[in-house]
Structure formats: C-alpha cells, structure tokens
C-alpha cells in the first residue's frame, strides 16, 4: 500500500564518489537551514505578543457573582455530573442569616474545586449550569511546578468583586430569551431584585 | 376478569384497579403516579397523574367512559379496554395535569435535596411542557422544622396526602395533617407540634417531592454523588424489619432510607432509630450495591452496571472460544 508519492525504496547500493565526499550534502543542508533565517517566523514572543483567539474560546473557568456581588453557585452538582473528565468536586453548606449578600441561594458551595490537569475544557459544565454561575473565559491556565497547584479552589475560581469578568459574549440567544420570562422566580433573581418578602 | 391495557390482555382478580393491572403488565404501560401508594389505604385520587382513557367499559356495557378516569381509584370490569400511552388524548391531559402540579412548585431543583430521586422531576421531564403559562405569583412559605429531624418546605408540596396517610396508618397517634382548604391548603402539625413517634421519619420517604426532607442529610451531598447500598440490622423495634438503604460517600453513611421498589414505593417502613441514629458502618450488615436503573442520574459515574456488562462480554467470548483473560495460568 502506498500512502504518499514521496516514499522511496530503501536500497543497499554503494555510494557514488560525490556522495562519499559528504560536503555537497552538508552544504545543501546548511542552505536549507540558512534559508529559514529569511522566512517569516512561526512563533511569537508570547507574553509580550498574544495571538487573536475566538470570541468563544474556552479557557480558565470563572465562578460568577450576581449583580449584587453574591455568589451565584448553589452547589447543585450539575457541572460535576456533566463533566466527562470528572474534574469537578464540591461540598455544599447552608447559608446563614445575614449572609444574603454573599450567597444568592440558601445553599452555597463551601468547597468548589476543579482539577485543571483533568479538565479538557469542553464547556459542558457551563452548558449544564442552571444558575449561570460557571463560565469558561478566554484566560489561560498558567503553568505550575506542583500537581497540587493545578487544583483550583474557590479562591482562584470566584471572580473578584472589584475585578469582574465579562462573559456576556458567551450567553446564547436561548439563554437571553429564557431570562425574559417574568413568571419564573429564577429570573426575578437575575434582575438583581430582592426576593419578595410577601408571605402567604 | 379480562382487561386490555394498551392492547395487552391480562387476567386479574376482582377488585383490582386499572393501575394495579397495568403494573402487573409492566412499566411500559403503567401510568405514572404521584399520590397513590400501595401500602397506604385510601391513598390516591388526588393528583390525577394516573388518568387513563377507558374506551370500553365492560363486555356487558361496551360504551366508553366520557372522560379520562383516575386509574388508581377505578376498578376493572370484565372486558374493559383501557388506553394509556397509546392515546394522544391521555398524554395531552397528563401534560395539563403536570402543568397544574407545577403551578405553585418552585424552580429550586438546584437547591432541593430531593433532586435526582424526585418523582415530580421525572414526571415533568417525561410529560410536561418546558414553559408555564401561569402569570401569578407562586405561593410562598418559610421552611419550618417538624421536630428536630424533618424539614418541611411547604413551597414544594403538591398536596398528595401521602405523609398524612403515613401518620394515620403507620404511626400511632396522628399529629400532622392538612389545614385550610383548596388553594390555601397546607401540610402542618398542630401549632407546629413536633412529630416524635417511632415511625414518623417515613413521611420523608413517601414524599414524592422535596417537601419533607431529612435534616440530618440536609445539603450534605447531591444524591448522585452518593453510593446506595442495601443493608440490614436486627432492629429492637418489633414493627421494624431493619431493611434499609444506606447512602454512602466513601466510608461515611450520609443517610439511611427505607428501600423503594421499582414504583418508588416503600414496603418495609423503618423506625427512627434505624433512620437517624445508626450512622456507623459497623451498625449494619451490608448486602451489596443497590441495583439502580442505568438511566437514573443516581447511576451516573458509579459504573456498577459495568460488572453486568463484563459478565455479558465474558459469556460472548466463551461462546466464541476465546481464552478467559481473567483466569490465572
């Protein structure tokens, strides 16, 4: 079977005089190497220059806060069960009175960890999230020296209150349409309104 | 008595309901239920989820019944012909029932401890529409404690009355029931009186939604991250057989529940000692992992079914004359 037309038969025939000199072959190789000096470079000076990436690039995760600065994640576990690499683990806790500004729902993630060595950046966690909490951003996972450092906890994942990360490009038209349904209590929360204290 | 359900004929004794006859045939034709529980007398007839179409009343009177009937409360007649999944009318009506059940049900599955083993979740996923047409505010209650072990989220209640029947029939001395009427009805204990008899914990297991949940398991872990195991112990209580299901995470027992059958119904009710106080692995004799339906979210990431698969593959290989790779030389 011939896969390419560049393949050649290997033979054991004796070298000619020119081949025995080695010098022409050497010069030919040097010429190829030298010609690359004048070609366009294949690499860039990474930290100083950055390549353009797609608007929907899937990089490092972020756990979003809502408009009031409260964490959106309610530790429902949908991301972890959707994760094909089983990279996400979490532990939940109940919100205490007075923590309404910190956590949006009555349950929150006490521990939320993503193992970045396991993660394949497929974005299924983002798709599974019912609370619009986890998003993949265009940031890259930095290199580390220890394996443990790749397990990202809430300290690295939750966005800083003064350094919000814009993910509006990642919200699909379907999601934006769903948010317009006023009847759902879910959407009441999205608009940053207070939960109605009306009791039956 | 001969009865035909979805084109399948079955012979059943007199006094059988359509639902029981359908369940004898199998899960393909059995209507879903929310309020009916075979161990609880007079349960059923509230939620209308199990409605079916009777196209022929009996051999004596072959007229169809004018409206869909609740199969859990309708007894079969000789020669009755029933349509469940084969009738688009029934499926449409059931979709309406689901919409009604979800009118006041909050969209808090991500927070609710029942998610993953919730009958209403399954029902809505299988039969309901994605959107609601209801424009008014849902009724809201604060979650309250019934005793120190049970949390009541009245928001999530669908008024199936199963817990009331449990308190009536399984425990001695009924202490909780339904107060007010119609849209205002709510499950309550008399002036929030604590439930404290031996079998009160069973209201958690019979609740088809997350209205009554175990406070010792509250927000501990999502159901599908735990590992269900069947276990038993010699319970001192003569009424309790001690047959339970343990929900483990690693070596830690997070929750103890009664065993549920394929219709999600409990037959051996367990006492509160077994449920709340025996949370050590040494208290129990573990029989083995619970057989969970492969399509259930609880079986996700568990790989128990792979053992079955392995046995099947081994059988095939043996039949084809391959060597047994697991055999030691």
Image (cartoon, coloured by chain):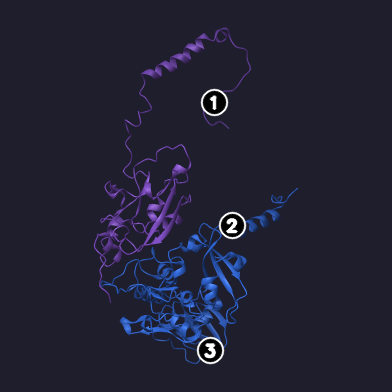
Chain colours: A purple, B blue
Location of residue A175 with respect to B34 vertically, above or below: above
Q: Please, which residue is most extreme toward the bottom here?
A: B60
Q: Do the residues under discs 2 and 3 have CB atoms within 8 angstroms?
A: no
Label 3 resides on the chain identified as B
Distance (Cα) linking label 1 and label 2: 46 Å
Looking at the image, tell me whether mark 2 or mark 3 is earlier in sequence order.
3
Left or right position of B241 against B134: right
Label 1 resides on the chain identified as A
Camera-side residue of B126 and B155:
B155
Q: Quadrant of residue B318?
A: bottom right
Q: Please, which residue is most extreme toward the right here?
A: B329
Disc 3 target residue: B15
- Badge 2: few (under 14), some or many (20 or more) residues near its Cα, within 10 Å? few
Q: Quadrant of residue B105?
A: bottom left
- Badge 3: few (under 14), some or many (20 or more) residues near its Cα, within 10 Å? few
Q: Is the residue at mark 2 from the same chain as the one at mark 3? A: yes
Label 2 resides on the chain identified as B
Location of residue B317 with respect to A9 vertically, above or below: below
Q: Nearer the viewer, mark 1 or mark 3?
A: 3
Residue A166 has which mark? none
Q: Position of residue A67 (x, y in %)?
A: 26, 55
Disc 2 target residue: B306
Disc 1 target residue: A7
For image coordinates 60% across by 76% down, the residue present is B235
Q: Nearer the viewer, mark 1 or mark 2?
A: 2
Location of residue A51 with respect to A93 vertically, above or below: above
Q: Provide the secondary structure element on which disc 2 rests.
A: helix
Distance (Cα) linking label 2 and label 3: 42 Å
């Amino acid at each position: 079977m011939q896969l390419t037309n560049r393949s050649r038969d290997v033979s054991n025939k004796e070298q000619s005089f020119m081949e025995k000199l080695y010098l022409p072959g050497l010069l030919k190789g040097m010429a190829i190497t030298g010609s690359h000096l004048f070609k366009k470079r294949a690499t860039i000076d990474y930290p100083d220059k950055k390549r353009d990436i797609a608007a929907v690039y899937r990089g490092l995760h972020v756990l979003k806060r809502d408009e009031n600065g409260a964490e959106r994640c309610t530790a429902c576990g949908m991301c972890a069960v959707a994760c094909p690499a089983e990279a996400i683990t979490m532990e939940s806790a109940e919100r205490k009175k007075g923590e309404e500004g910190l956590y949006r729902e009555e349950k929150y993630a006490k521990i939320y960890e993503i193992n970045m060595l396991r993660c394949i950046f497929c974005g299924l966690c983002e798709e599974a999230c019912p609370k619009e909490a986890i998003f993949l951003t265009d940031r890259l996972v930095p290199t580390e020296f220890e394996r443990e450092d790749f397990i990202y906890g809430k300290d690295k994942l939750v966005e800083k209150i003064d350094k919000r990360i814009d993910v509006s490009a990642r919200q699909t038209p379907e999601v934006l349409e769903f948010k317009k349904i006023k009847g759902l209590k879910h959407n009441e929360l999205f608009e940053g309104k207070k939960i109605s204290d009306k009791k039956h | 008595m001969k009865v035909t359900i979805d084109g399948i004929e079955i012979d059943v004794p007199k006094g059988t309901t359509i639902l029981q006859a359908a369940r004898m045939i199998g899960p393909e034709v059995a209507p879903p239920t929310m309020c009916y529980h075979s161990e609880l007398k007079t349960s059923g007839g509230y939620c209308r989820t199990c409605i079916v179409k009777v196209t022929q009343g009996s051999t004596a009177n072959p007229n169809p019944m004018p409206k869909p009937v609740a199969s859990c409360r309708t007894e079969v007649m000789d020669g009755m012909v029933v349509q469940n999944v084969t009738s688009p009318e029934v499926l449409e009506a059931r979709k309406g029932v689901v919409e009604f059940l979800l009118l006041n049900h909050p969209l808090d599955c991500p927070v609710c401890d029942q998610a993953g083993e919730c009958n209403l979740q399954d029902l809505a996923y299988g039969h309901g529409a994605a959107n609601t047409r209801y424009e008014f505010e849902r009724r809201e209650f604060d979650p309250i404690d019934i005793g120190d072990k049970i949390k009541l989220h009245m928001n999530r209640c669908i008024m199936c009355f199963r817990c009331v029947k449990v308190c009536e029939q399984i425990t001695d001395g009924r202490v909780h029931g339904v107060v007010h009427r119609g849209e205002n009805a709510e499950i309550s204990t008399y002036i929030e009186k604590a439930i404290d008899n031996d079998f009160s914990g069973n209201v958690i297991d019979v609740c088809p939604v997350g209205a009554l949940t175990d406070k010792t398991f509250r927000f501990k872990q999502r159901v599908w991250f735990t590992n269900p195991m069947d276990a038993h112990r010699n319970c001192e209580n003569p009424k309790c057989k001690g047959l339970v299901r343990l929900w483990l995470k690693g070596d830690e027992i997070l929750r103890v529940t009664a065993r549920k059958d394929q219709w999600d119904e409990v037959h051996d009710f367990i006492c509160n000692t077994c449920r709340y106080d025996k949370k050590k692995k040494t208290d129990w004799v573990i029989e083995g992992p619970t057989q969970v339906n492969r399509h259930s979210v609880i079986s996700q990431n568990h790989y128990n079914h792979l053992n079955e698969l392995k046995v099947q593959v081994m059988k095939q290989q043996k039949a084809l004359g391959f060597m047994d790779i697991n055999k030691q030389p």
